Amino acid sequence: MAENVYILGINMTKFGKHADKDVVDLGAEAAMAALADAGVTMREMGILAAGNLMNAGAGFGQRLQKQIGQTGIPVYNVANACATGATALRTVIMAVKSGEVDYGLAVGVEKLAGAGLLGGGGSAKKDGKVWEPSGRFGAVAPTDGRIGTDAMPGTFAQVGMEYGHKYGGASFELFAKISEKNHAHSVLNPLAAYSKRFTLEEIMGDMMIAYPNTRPMCSANCDGGAAAVVVSESKLRTLSLEQQRRAIKISASVLTTDPYEEACQVLPNVNTLTRNAAKIAYEQAGVGPEDLNLVELHDCFATAELVHYDNLMLCPEGGAVDFFNSGAPWRDGSTPVNVSGGLQSKGHPISATGIANIWEVCHHLRGEAGPRQIEGAKVGLAHVIGLGSACGVHILEKSAA
Amino acid sequence: MTDTAAAPAQVPLVDYLVLGDRPHLVAHQCTSCGARFFDRRNACAGCFGTSFEPAEVATEGEVRAFTIVTFAAPGVPVPFVSAIVDCGGTSVRGNIINTEPDPEHVKLGMQVRLATFSLGTDDNGTEAIGFGFEPA
Ligand SMILES: [Zn+2]
C-alpha cells in the first residue's frame, strides 16, 4: 500500500530583488527555514530534489548540500520550465510515497530580477550576410517576429484571445480586471515582490507588452526561493502532536504533459494538460472544485488566468468570463483565486513558483496567513504550468490530527 | 553546399514555404491519421505512424487568435501582429501583414489569405521571401 504523504515544513523567501545573495544563498535560506518549520534537519532527509532553471546544468542541488549539509543522499536536479518547482516537489513525493524514504526535501530557486523578456532570446539576432538555411525549418533568417512571436507575453496573449474567440466576452478590459484583482490581493502579502493596488485605468493605460497584456498584466521577473519538507504518514505519526497538527496532507500530486492535438505545433496547448491534471487530482483527492477554499493558479499573464478557471473546472466549460464577472475569484468570493497576489504581483522566480504556491495554500490551511487568511480554509489547490509543456496540480488538505 | 554560381534568385524564409506563381505552405502529413507537421518527425505525435506524405496547406483561413506585440527581443522590429490562422483545418502561425497593427484592424474571426514579403537581398544577390496573412 502506497504511503500517504504530508508537507511537514515549508517556506518561501521574500520575492523581489536580492542583489546581495546568489542562488545558493537563497536556496539555503528557504531550505533551512523549511527544515526548521518541520522540526527536522538534513540528517533525516532521504532525498533532495532541486531546481534552478536558468542554470540547470550547474548542479544546484549538490551546491546547496555543500551549503547546508552533505549527507550523501541522492540529489535529483530537475528542470521543467515554469513547472520546475512542482516537479522537484513531485519527485520527492514519489520517493516518499513509494516507501523508499521517510523524508524528502524539495527546493526551487531563481534569480531573475532585471531579466528581460523570456522566451524570445536575450541577445539581438542578426540576419546573416548570406541567406543560409539552418535548423529544423530550414530558416534562412531569425523567425521570431517574422512568423509570429516566440516570446511568452504574446504566446499567452494568444491563449487568452483563442478562448475569447471560442466563447466570447474576453475583452481587453476583462483581462485587465483579472490583473486588478491580483494586484488588489497582493496588498496583504508582505512576501510579494510588488504589493501595490492599481486602478483599472492604470492597468489599461500602462505600457502595452503584447496586446491585450500590458506590463502589470505580466508576471514579474524577480529573485526568490522556496522549499518544502515532505514526510510519510507512518513517520509523521511518530512525531510530536504539534508537528502532526501543522502537517498538511497532500491529497493529490499530479504532473502531466501536453497530449498531441492539432495546432499544438503553432500554439502550445496549455488547456488540455491542465484539465487532465485537474481531473486526475480531483479523483485522487476525492474532492471536487466546489470543495476548494482557495486556489493558487499559474497567472503568468492575465490572459492565462482566465483559461485556467475553465481548465481547473472552477466554472462550467466556456464559463470563465461569467465566473470572473460573478466575483467568485476575489478573496471574498466563492472560490478565491490567487489571494497571494499571483505571479503578476507576488512575482515569478521560475523554479521557486511551484513550491511557493504550495506554501501559500499551506499557510491558509494552517490558519497562519494573518490578515490575508481565508477563514476556515480546509482544502486548497495549487497549479503551475511550464511551456513545452508540463503541468503540476497539487491538492492540499488541513490535517485532521 | 550550395553552388553559389547557381544560386537561385529567391529563397523561402523557411523550407515549408513553397515559392513560385502560387506561394503556399506544405506540411508532412501522416498517412495514417492525417496529422500535419511543418518539421520532420520520426513518428506521428498523434498515432505513432511512420509514413508521411507532402500536403499542401490551404492559403485562406480564419484568425483564431492574435496578439499585437509591442515589446520584443532585441533586434525584432515592433509592432507586429502574431496570429494563429485556421487554414482549412490546419493551424498556421504567421504575422498579419498589409494592414494596421491595431485592434481596430485585426479581429478574431477575420478572413485572411497567405501573402509574401521580401526580407531583402544577400551578398550573392539572393532575395529571401517570407510569408504572412493579409485581410481577404
Ligand atoms: Zn498519425
Image: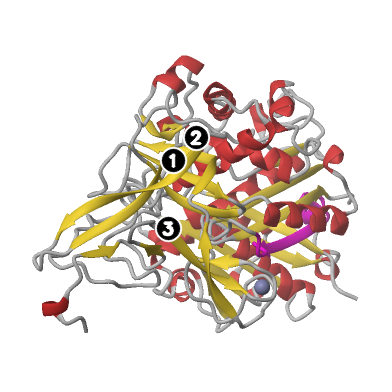
Marks 2,1: beta carbons within 8 A: yes
Horizontal and vertical percent position of residue B46: 67, 70
In the image shown, does A186 or A198 lie closer to the viewer? A198
- Which dot, 1 or 3, sits closer to the camera? 3
Q: From the viewer's perspective, is residue A121 above or below residue A190?
A: below
Q: Amino acid at mark 2?
A: Ser
Looking at the picture, which amino acid does disc 1 mark?
Ala
Which residue is identified by label 2? Answer: A345
Identify the residue position indicated by label 3 in the image. Answer: B24
Residue A271 at x, y percent in the picture? 66, 50
Q: Residues within 10 Å of mark 2 (few under 14, many from 20)?
A: many
Q: Looking at the image, tell me whether mark 2 or mark 1 is earlier in sequence order.
A: 1
Q: Are marks 1 and 3 in contact (CB under 8 Å)?
A: no
Residue that badge 1 annotates: A220
Residue at image point 45% right, 44% down: B113
Residue A203 lies in what quarter of the image?
top left
Q: Which residues are magenta?
A: A241-261
